[in-house]
Amino acid sequence: MMNEHGDISRTLLAWYDRCARTMPWRGIHDPYRTWVSETMLQQTRVETVLPFYERFLDRFPTLMDLAAADESDVLKMWEGLGYYSRARNLRKGALQVAEQYGGLLPRDPAILRKISGIGPYTAGAIASIAYDVPVPAVDGNVIRVLSRLFGIRENAALPEIRKKLERLASALVPEHRPGDHNQAVMDLGATVCVPGTPDCSRCPLSAYCDAFARGDAAELPVLPRSRPQKTEYWTVMVLRAGDCTLVRRRTESLLHGLWCFPMMEGAPEDALRKLAKQAHMPCRSAGCPCSARHVFTHLIWEMTILPLETDPDQPPPGDYIWLPWQQLSSLTFPAAMNAALRAADHLFSR
Ligand code: SF4
């Protein structure tokens, strides 16, 4: 088995030398850049990440620059990339590294995992890619490749099966070029051993692959069905009072720290009634409502966007503020608010 593992790794590295995807974070040994790239790549495609990566590193070229930054600046640089908790944790982690490790990310994966925003996968990626530590970096892509390669036909979400896959991943990592090996597995999972039907005819590992031999690669890995997404119905109110609009910075865990227009769950009539009652703010319609939908991982927001007008000098309710509408672009809004921002542009530029 050990020899076979060695053969697999050598074959994979030879394939990587021929076919590796070119990416700006490759070919460098800079743990901060590896951390930023791996964080951005979570749940996000490489093509999407590329412009954000360049822009983020122009603004925060070193870990100490990131540690010294305001959270609102970091969120602004992340605007449009989604999953904003990644940006908040990255900044928090940078502060921790600045304070506890003199600004240099540790090389030990067990210590890396204690840093905010660094889980087992990212710790493995940083240690192997930036420091040549022979440890695996196991994510969903790797689980898929290894389940097929070694014919693991049990539920990969079960802790004992996950552990088995992690042991296999560890056994495959070579002492020499562990970072390249891990990136080769990632590339294979992203370009050849893809979800659904893999392209086995192009795969360098087909001679070793159990699922290829048995013809059931498309059924692996075995994973429990994901739960259906919950749908919530919201009314988003784009409110104009003179030159100002009403906004608030979210304190909820979803989209925490990002800016939103007033939102109430339920149909527009109920939302307007609640606004008049709770905020003592009578409003009148200022345009046609429109609908928008935003899909999160486990949740869908179906939104009705209402352009409204109220009288100036109304006190803002709760944690809302009146903001001159020209300043909206200086705040970080989540993509879920894109349709409402367009409605605001329309409302104020009439
Ligand atoms: Fe994946 Fe097919 Fe390669 Fe096996 S042979 S690792 S299933 S692409």
Image (tube, rainbow, N blue to C red):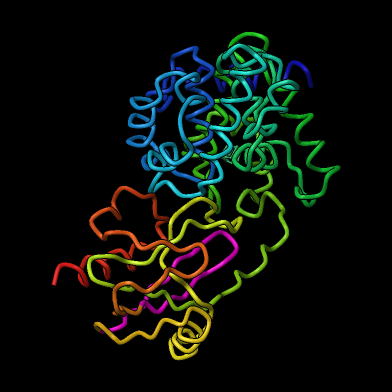
Q: Give the range drawn in magenta.
A: 288-305
Q: Is the magenta stretch mostly helix, strand or loop?
A: strand
Q: Which residue is drawn at 20% across and 70% down?
A: 346
Q: Choose between 248 and 264: the one closer to the eye.
A: 248
* For residue 168, above or below residue 321: above
- Examine the image and state in which quarter residue 122 appears: top right
* For residue 211, above or below residue 122: below
Q: Where is residue 315 in the image (x, y as percent from the top left)?
A: 41, 70
Residue 193, magenta (yes or no):
no
- Examine the image and state in which quarter residue 243 appears: bottom left
- Examine the image and state in which quarter residue 108 appears: top right
Q: Where ligand 1 lies, by image quadrant?
A: top right
Q: Residue at x 66, y 62 (%)?
A: 226
Q: Which residue is drawn at 26% across and 66% down?
A: 342
* For residue 36, above or below residue 272: above
Q: Residue at x 33, y 59 (%)?
A: 323
Residue 299, magenta (yes or no):
yes
In screen coordinates, is 103 left or right of 156?
Answer: left
In screen coordinates, is 276 left or right of 157?
Answer: left
Task: Give the residue furthest to the top.
Answer: 176
Quarter of the rendering occupied by the C terminus: bottom left
* For residue 163, above or below residue 83: above
Q: How many labels does the image show?
A: 0
Q: Choose between 298 and 59: the one closer to the eye.
A: 59
Q: Where is residue 57 in the image (x, y as percent from the top left)?
A: 38, 25
Quarter of the rendering occupied by the N terminus: top right
In screen coordinates, is 329 left or right of 28?
Answer: left
Q: Choose between 76 and 283: the one closer to the eye.
A: 283
Q: Position of residue 320 (x, y in %)?
A: 45, 63
Q: Where is residue 72 in the image (x, y as percent from the top left)?
A: 44, 41
